[in-house]
Image: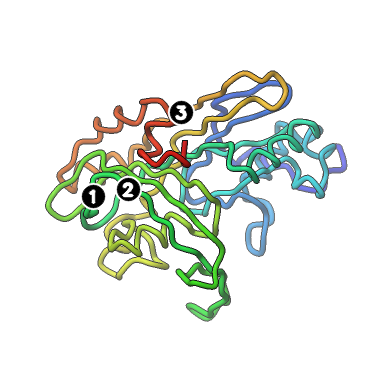
Amino acid sequence: MANFSIEPNERVAFKVRHADDDVLVIEKPAHIVSTPGAGHERGSLLNGLFATYGKQLQNLGKDRDFGMLHRLDRETSGLLIVALRAVAYDKLRSMFETRAIRKFYFAVVAGVPNQTSGVIRRPINEVRETRDRREMKIAKISGSGKPATTAYRVLDASAAASFLECRAVSGRLHQLRVHLESIRCPIFGDDLYAPPAIAKGSPRLALHAHRVAFTHPVTGLTLDVLSPMPADIKRLVTKLGMDPKKASAAKEPAAKAAGNDADLE
């Protein structure tokens, strides 16, 4: 067996939504962490990726994060971009830094935004707090924080809930969660930022990264990759009196899905 830095684990499931010699777009299920950590040394998505792509990821090495360009929270499902070659990683990293990669999410939230579409620009600071006897990083809206921008639009709404599509323009810690809470629309199942009744309103965080759109770092072709809404989020949308079929509106061109703000396109 090859001597890998990350222990391969073929039991960690994921779906491949796009694959070529340079780039993967994979779908992470909920309840799985993105990378190994305390208590998750073998059960992360990266462990699963090493079971299939170990040689390529090992060649990229720790300095290039073994190909992992970004992460999703444990309870968030959806799409992640993974590089398989150094030239692809370096170009994609630069594209992330210049916000050239567009990431879209479905979110089911309590309440209804004041506007059917909008842009949230509120700086976010990362702080350490002790919760449930363990120290963790959380995000807070703060004037001393780093700039953060989220665009959203309402796909459907009922009396007390909304089904949103959001674009995370910047990539701060828990950005969508804290931004949506800041406009009084916390995400169902969010046990960090939502009130207890809303946190218990879904068995997991009702957030799904359903779309990524970017220019392929080697071929120059446009990749626009979609992930269908998971069954559990469909059930929640229906339970709250909304229509999950409204997700089809999210198949409009990515620039339109970002909202009308010109600097988000």
- The label nearer to you, 3 versus 1, is 1
Q: How many residues crowd around disc 3 within 10 Å: few (fewer than 14), some, or many (20 or more)?
A: many
Q: Amino acid at mark 3?
A: Leu
Vertical side of 201 occupied by 246: above or below: above
Q: Position of residue 239 (x, y in %)?
A: 19, 46
Identify the residue at horizontal 47%, vertical 41% (top origin).
Answer: 263
Sequence-wise, which precedes: disc 3 or disc 1?
1
Identify the residue at horizontal 65%, vertical 40% (top origin).
Answer: 48
Sequence-wise, which precedes: disc 3 or disc 2?
2
Identify the residue at horizontal 24%, vertical 32% (top origin).
Answer: 246
**Residue 261: quarter of image:** top left
Disc 3 versus disc 1: distance between alpha carbons? 26 Å
Disc 3 versus disc 2: distance between alpha carbons? 23 Å
Question: What colour-coding does the image apply?
Answer: rainbow
Vertical side of 195 occupied by 215: above or below: above
Identify the residue at horizontal 69%, vertical 18% (top origin).
Answer: 219
Secondary structure of residue under mark 2: strand
In this orientation, which residue lies closer to the viewer: 256 or 166? 256
Q: Position of residue 234 (x, y in %)?
A: 28, 39
